[in-house]
Image (cartoon, rainbow, N blue to C red):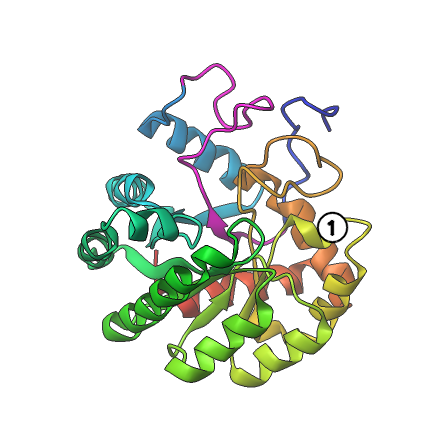
Amino acid sequence: MGGRGEVPGRPDPLPIAVVDNHTHLDIRRDDIPDAIAPDGGEERTTEDVAAALATAAAVGVDRVVQVGCDLESARFTVAQVDRHPAMLGAVALHPNEVPALAEAGRLQEAWAEIEELAAHPRIRAVGESGLDHFRTGPEGHAAQEESFRWHIDLAKRTGKALQIHDRDSHEDVLRILADEGAPETTVLHCFSGDAAMARECIDRGYLLSFAGTVTFKSAGDLREALAITPLDQVLAETDAPYLTPSPERGNANAPYLLPHTVRVMARTRGVDVPTMCRAVSDNAARVYGPW
């Protein structure tokens, strides 16, 4: 492994290939060394993406869901999914993007473009949409809620999965899903709730996607949630370049680091690693269809 502030080394390969349910290959962090293209420019290229996918495949992460959560990254996602057979996509307006668009009078226009991009056959999910009461104050909550309801409707109208962003807003997310009626396939991206919330989501038939946070020493509540989640409702993700799993916390994340998370998930759930890999892979195929 690399030291803090370095490009992490490759983990041992997984025995069965899995899917990274949620990654942002268009985003390059400027605070720590880049894990995908250390010598690259600010803008991600098709070659950067191809290299990231190849590195991930070498350790048993052979498919990814690339998530575009503003207009620029949604356009990037649609352009890239046609170039890489290992990549499917999701597009939406992130809840933290919404208040500024609403204030500028551009939200309707942005929704229209997202709907157009979501029609692409290799865009298999609407997301990430939801609520964020951590980065956005009360003045932006109404716009976030309106946009979340719009994205729920879009997922239902298109028959695509919904990937939800939920930060410090568990009760409101569950309330709105109940009000609107959740899409047939609903995924809580980077699940951050406790066992009680997990039980509510499980009972409603949602899938819970676990990120590198589940490997953190302080994440006991999150591991308790995972421990009760049925294997047929579990997904795994990086949310790269963020939420890097232990033992690489403090470095930039990338899809090739997902094996660290999958191994902790297996141990937490009380199954062997191949069993967890099969569950993650099979569930992703059921949610998104064939790559």
Q: Residue under label 1, please give it.
A: 215
- Look at the image and tell me whether residue 195 can be seen: yes
Q: Label 1 is placed on what type of residue? A: Thr
Q: Which residues are magenta?
A: 15-41
Q: Which x, y percent locates residue 179? A: 42, 83
Which SS does the magenta portion mostly show? loop
Is disc 1 placed on a helix, strand or loop? helix
Tell me: 124 left or right of 254. Answer: left
Q: Is residue 200 above or below residue 131?
A: below
Per the image, is 217 magenta? no
Q: Which x, y percent locates residue 116? A: 17, 56
Which image quarter: residue 6? top right
Question: The C terminus is located in which quarter?
Answer: bottom left
> Looking at this view, is 64 or 15 the one in front?
64
Per the image, is 22 magenta? yes
Q: Which x, y percent locates residue 108? A: 21, 57
Q: Which x, y percent locates residue 99? A: 38, 52
Q: Residue at x 24, y 74 (%)?
A: 157
- The outermost residue toward the front is 139
